[in-house]
Image (cartoon, rainbow, N blue to C red):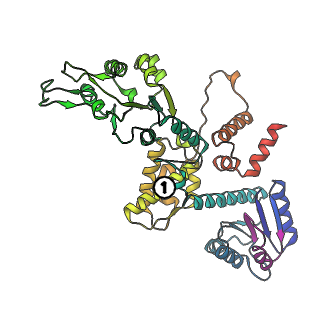
Amino acid sequence: MTSVLVVDDEKAMAEAMADELRARHLEVAVLTSADEAFSGLTEHEFDVIVTDLNMRGMSGVDFCQRVVTNRPDIPVIVVTAFGSMETAVATLRAGAFDFLTKPFDMEELVITVERAAQHKLLREEVKRLRGAAESSRFAELVGTSHAMKGVYALLDRIADTDATALITGETGTGKELAARAIHARSRRKAAPLVTVNCAAVPTHLLESELFGHVRGAFTDARSDRKGLFAQADQGTLFLDEIGEMPLDMQAKLLRALESRAVRPVGGQQEIPFDVRLVAATHRDLVASIEEGTFREDLYYRINVIELTIPPLRARGTDVLLLAQTFLEHFARQDDKPVRRISPPVAERFLAYAWPGNIRELRNCLERAVALARFEEIIVEDLPAHVREYRAAHVLLAVNDPSELVPLAQVEQRYIERVLETVGGNKRQAAQILGLDRATLYRKMERWSR
């Protein structure tokens, strides 16, 4: 539960604020002296402090400065009856998280306190992630989310077998890294891992690329050339974007996989091979089969074990862990003293949908490090579309109005889906949803009635 300290020498005002916060299931303590409040910070832990500006003894600005100097982990909200620009500047220079001008709506106070508590959680998470990258790795894959732990478990079980694997997932999720992890943990790891992007090789060259060719097979074939199946012998062959392979080539690939031998273009003899095949695609191959662009028999041949890499938006705070990893990489590469991301940046990273997944995040961090002027990445260093992102639409999967459901039910389903994605971790779910934990608990309690 979020704990709040309210400091105001007007006891009636302090109690009014405390009552409103307690009504939102926050834990609140009230003190009427800034000196007493500062002394008490060594004995009690608070998530947020709300302090009046003008008090007898130590002023709110001085109190804020002392808290920021000695306990920078606690955000301070300053309440003032003097809403001038000079007052605002003074409080922010003192390190205040925010300030409110009297008279204010109590709902505004609650929202500001909840934002400050979220800010503190994000700061703690960013600090934790700065040293967590190495302990959260599985080969080159990085992440500690429930979704990625499921990926790691399956990778670990299939790595030391020869079973053909099909890796699916959106573009930029790290499918090639998963293929590398399979090879690195397999009994074939001493032999080559050979990779080909089926979408990047022209159709008329793909057969030669995979199976090789003999001298004189076509123009410019001045000597024999081993194909990738032969080059990967005893190792692993990774066919990336297999969904882009032309139909006639799919038939030839299927025959090769079933006979465990390839015939070079222009050759008469078949050459046996011993490779483990790993394929990947961002396409829905079942839909491609229905559209007639992918062979059903090849699909069942390569889909012995399917491994789905989740999109970044379904991985919770993995986005912060990955961001810190990329930050450290580019800071070393550019020789810049950038150490961390700021909490406001972390907040935007968690809110953004990342349609380009990890590839987009990597590019974002490369840009941010290049532009950074301080030890931490700030919001101004981010691309405009990330900086200004706001979720603005909901996709409806039905056309019949009778099938539509109330908004409360949509909210419940979405929250339950987030909780499922993060393995029931309510703190992590609250961060993703932009709620404080007390609000999340309150909603869950209401559903159980």
Q: Nearer the viewer, residue 231 or 391?
A: 231
- Crowding at mark 1 (Cα within 10 Å: few <14, some 14-19, many 20+): many
Q: How many marks?
A: 1
Quadrant of the image occupied by residue 44? bottom right
Magenta highlight on residue 330: no
Q: Nearer the viewer, residue 448 or 108?
A: 448
Residue 166 shown left or right of residue 442 in the figure: left
- Quadrant (top left/top right/bottom left/bottom right) for the C terminus: top right
- Tell me the magenta residue range: 30-51
Amino acid type, mark 1: Thr
Quadrant of the image occupied by residue 413? top right
Q: Residue at x 79, y 46 (%)?
A: 442
Q: Residue at x 74, y 74 (%)?
A: 53
Residue 428, given in percent of the width and then of the height, sits at: 66, 49
39 versus 257 height, above or below: below
Secondary structure at numbered mark 1: helix
Residue 284, given in percent of the width and then of the height, sits at: 48, 26
183 versus 82 height, above or below: above
Magenta highlight on residue 41: yes
214 versus 47 height, above or below: above
- The residue that disc 1 covers is 325
Quadrant of the image occupied by residue 102? bottom right
